[in-house]
Amino acid sequence: MDDTRPRPAWVREGRKPRVVIVGGGFGGLHAARALSRDDVELLVLDRTNHHLFQPLLYQVATATLPPSDITAPIRWLLRKQRNTSVLMTEVQSIDVHRRIVTADNGARKIPYDFLIVAAGARHAYFGHPEWETVAPGLKSIRDALTLRNRILTAFEQAELTEDPLEQQAWLTFVLVGGGPTGVELAGMIPTIAQQSMPREFRRIASLQARVVLLEGGPKVLGSYPDSLSRQARTDLIALGVDVRTGAMVTNVAPGEVRVGADETIHTHTVIWAAGNAASPLGASIGAPRDRAGRVIVARDLSVPDHPEIFVIGDMAYVASPDGMEVPSVAPAAMQMGRHAATNIRRTLEARPPLPFAYSNKGDLATIGRHRAIADLGRVRLSGSIAWWFWLFLHILYLAGFRNRLSVLIQWAYSYFTYERGARLITDTGNATTPNTSSVRGT
Ligand SMILES: Cc1cc2nc3c(=O)[nH]c(=O)nc-3n(C[C@H](O)[C@H](O)[C@H](O)COP(=O)(O)OP(=O)(O)OC[C@H]3O[C@@H](n4cnc5c(N)ncnc54)[C@H](O)[C@@H]3O)c2cc1C
């Protein structure tokens, strides 16, 4: 034992070490659970009161599930942990020298001995933040409700207008980005348009909704093997989606999307699923970051020169031992959360931290109502087998027993009836694109 080391603050002050976790998403929640039996004071900070199961957000956006089915109060999830407190508060900055987290616009200063930062990511608009109001993305419940409002309002507006050009613009849905979120949303909208809506609308019943998926790269689901990516494209086309690869969006404005130099798509519903930017909290840590704003962490997930700070999940850039980048997905965030907890425990026991190794269990994406693709390493699945597998896994991982049961019932109902259980337009202020005259004006 090295006796010359200064004694840690909690030893000098005769208290338990305080671990602060920023973010109660996949990474933060699993870090907190992994520390449930440790002799520490654990504080979980989140700007919302709920943990969100992001993989099913698109089901809220497309009115299949209500928000309460894919969320659970963080306080409730951690209620059995005697060493844990949960605070609903928004963190603005981190003073790594004084070891203080500042929240609620400076009103709250929260000291820490160990810090786990797991504040996730937002959308990136490639230098065009002004596109966001026209083309919202999907990261939070609020985003999902905005999209749900816009999708449902588009049908209402199409029914209202008598101008055929306007009608077509309202029935044109453009998705930007052919990753899993873009593909999943694109696969659901034709079902809404062809199966759920025609029975209730009179003027637009015979009209064809147009769903366009724009992907700048050479294929949809770019991180999947070619065979699955091709299958996804075939499935989308079979559903009636206009899949465009190599299609660069050059402008987004009310009423239209520009593709390349000379194509304009008239639409009032644009959904952004094209890029990620890590939480701006990473900037206040002062460590190097990559182009997506992710903090470049050491192999043990700590911040260089700050062994007491761990950055995990979508906020962290970490290379696997094989040189591959750890992807920004839920299993990686959960594994990182548990690993950061292990390394805090090891530090408290005066043992060296361990390097993180990501265990990739596979990737899944759904296409429409009952098809999916699954890349499980040696095993690759597509079609309805992959969909059943997807369904099983998502039910398994959904937080809270009540949610699981409710989701199963909602899915079964929607599957057999084509009804969309959560078809509410709740905030019309958010729901429409303001300028509806641009179709005729161009
Ligand atoms: C639409 C969508 C679909 C997805 N589908 C899949 C999928 O099918 N499979 C898969 O593996 N992954 C999927 N992902 C990715 C996966 O959800 C993320 O990789 C994962 O959520 C990252 O976990 P995290 O803990 O880093 O961040 P998050 O889970 O995003 O949690 C971040 C938490 O931090 C809180 N927070 C943020 N800023 C602050 C602040 N300043 N102060 C306090 N609290 C703050 C947030 O409220 C949130 O609770 C999907 C993501 C999206 C958006």
Image (cartoon, grey):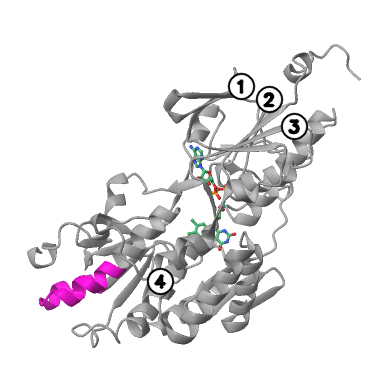
In front here: 101 or 425? Answer: 425
**Residue 270 falls left or right of residue 433:** right
In front here: 268 or 418? Answer: 418
Q: Going 74% across and 15% down the picture, which residue do you hit?
A: 13
Query: Which numbered disc, 3 or 4, marks the residue closer to the eye?
Result: 3
Residue named by callout 2 = 113
Residue 342 placed where, x, y %?
A: 77, 40
Residue named by callout 3 = 40
Task: Say which element carries label 1.
Answer: loop
Does 43 sit above or below residue 364? above
Q: Quadrant of residue 318?
A: top right
- Tell me how far mark 2 sits from mark 1, CA to CA: 7 Å
Residue 92 placed where, x, y %?
A: 47, 30
Residue named by callout 4 = 186
- In terms of sequence position, does the residue under pointer 2 or pointer 3 come before the other? 3
Tell whether position 163 is magenta. yes
Does 52 sit above or below residue 269? above
- In terms of sequence position, does the residue under pointer 2 or pointer 1 come before the other? 1
Asked if disc 2 and disc 1 are in contact, CB closer than 8 Å, the reply is yes
Task: Say which element carries label 3.
Answer: loop
